[in-house]
Image (cartoon, rainbow, N blue to C red):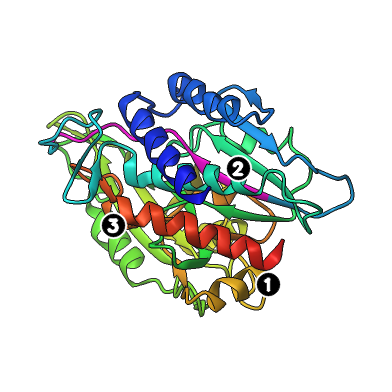
């Protein structure tokens, strides 16, 4: 049965690659995922472009385990030399946009859920959710679906981790910064030019260190990613603008970081949002221990996923390699999907 599920999962992934599914434009892939459930005689529901289902013996009062991955993609970059929507296998690699991020994980989780759909008297209720708008952190993805779903006690988020155990993930706060000065004609003296203040401000951001360092995620990483000022050659602007990307470890909440930087920074800072918090699961949790028992290694992930939307313990785990995500000629090894489905099934066998 597992071999058949694996082949069906690969066929599904090829179909998903061939259907354009940019964030908020996932109607086609949602429809194809619906057909997976129909073909396996599993009742499903759909909210916007999120498709989800419950295991057959879902029982009120039991803890609930969410299996989640996304079916939206970024847009293909200009460096592609292969057709991004033409799924094909070369030397054991399945090429195509979304194959690695996160199609491989999604179809493997669908195979996992289908394998255990009729599992008798499981310890956990199971919910599978194939969600939208992950790449854009949009309003109609997992975050909106959580308002519909029952309370979630535990989650596996499918992202490319080489099937190692991402037990923690950094959060994200993006700040818009303003360095204020005095506008004037360029021909006149002006000791309050905001552009001339930038070197000192940039040096502060470069040198500032957050005190708390996480064992799993290391230090908070703060990076100035954009600088802009002025529109005319003969006008000193009243403001210079910065964008600051802050990757938050699990020693701080996003609000802690906002309060600290707004107090200390030599410019005005406004966070764009504070809802993408860091996430983690205790190393002694039975799910992590089961994974380690299968030879998987725990680590802290620097990349962001839908884990940030969850308030329960969650583990990021999936086939594929994060370094291939968003790259030209994206691919996943067929063997990675085969291994991923096998490890997923063995993992749940230890806790169900």
Q: Quadrant of residue 63?
A: bottom right
Q: Quadrant of the C terminus?
A: bottom right
Q: Quadrant of residue 340?
A: bottom left
In the figure, is residue 350 to the left or right of 64?
left
Separation of residues labelled 2 and 1 (CA atoms): 22 Å
Magenta segment? 66-78
Q: Quadrant of residue 124?
A: bottom right
Find disc 3 in the rendering and name its residue: 323
Picture disc at residue 72: none
Find disc 2 in the rendering and name its residue: 114
Q: Label 2 near label 3: C-beta < 8 Å?
A: no
Q: Earlier in the sequence, mark 3 or mark 1?
A: 1
Q: Earlier in the sequence, mark 3 or mark 2?
A: 2
Q: Is residue 69 magenta?
A: yes
Residue nearest the viewer, comparing 201 with 45: 45
Residue depicted at 66% across the width and 28% down the height: 44
Separation of residues labelled 3 and 2 (CA atoms): 29 Å
Residue 193 in sight in this render: no
Residue that sits furthest to the right in the current view: 61
Residue nearest the viewer, comparing 56 with 23: 56
């Amino acid at each position: 049965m597992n071999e058949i599920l694996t082949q069906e999962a690969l066929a599904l992934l090829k179909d998903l690659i061939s259907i354009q599914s940019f964030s908020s434009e996932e109607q086609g892939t949602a429809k194809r995922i619906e057909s997976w459930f129909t073909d396996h005689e599993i009742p499903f529901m759909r909210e916007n472009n999120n498709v989800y289902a419950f295991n057959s013996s879902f029982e009120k009062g039991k803890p609930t385990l969410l299996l989640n991955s996304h079916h939206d993609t970024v847009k293909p970059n200009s460096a592609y030399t292969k057709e991004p929507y033409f799924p094909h296998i070369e030397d054991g690699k399945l090429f195509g946009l979304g194959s690695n991020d996160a199609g491989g994980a999604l179809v493997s989780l669908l195979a996992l859920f289908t394998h255990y759909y009729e599992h008798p008297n499981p310890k956990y209720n199971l919910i599978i959710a194939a969600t939208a708008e992950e790449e854009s952190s949009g309003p109609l993805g997992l975050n909106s679906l959580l308002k519909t779903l029952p309370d979630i006690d535990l989650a596996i988020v499918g992202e490319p981790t080489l099937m190692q155990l991402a037990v923690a993930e950094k959060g994200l706060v993006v700040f818009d910064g303003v360095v204020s000065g005095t506008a004037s004609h360029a021909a006149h003296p002006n000791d309050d030019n905001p552009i001339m203040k930038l070197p000192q401000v940039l040096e502060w951001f470069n040198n500032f260190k957050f005190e708390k360092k996480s064992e799993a995620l290391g230090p908070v990483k703060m990076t100035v990613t954009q600088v802009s000022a002025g529109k005319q050659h003969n006008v000193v602007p009243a403001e210079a603008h910065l964008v600051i990307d802050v990757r938050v470890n699990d020693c701080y909440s996003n609000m802690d970081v906002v309060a600290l930087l707004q107090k200390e920074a030599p410019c005005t800072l406004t966070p764009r949002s504070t809802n993408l918090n860091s996430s983690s699961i205790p190393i002694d949790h039975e799910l992590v221990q089961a994974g380690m028992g299968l030879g998987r290694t725990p680590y802290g992930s620097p990349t962001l996923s839908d884990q940030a939307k969850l308030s329960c313990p969650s583990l990021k785990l999936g086939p594929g390699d994060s370094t291939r995500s968003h790259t030209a000629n994206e691919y996943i090894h067929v063997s990675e999907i085969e291994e991923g489905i096998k490890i997923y099934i063995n993992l749940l066998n230890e806790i169900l």
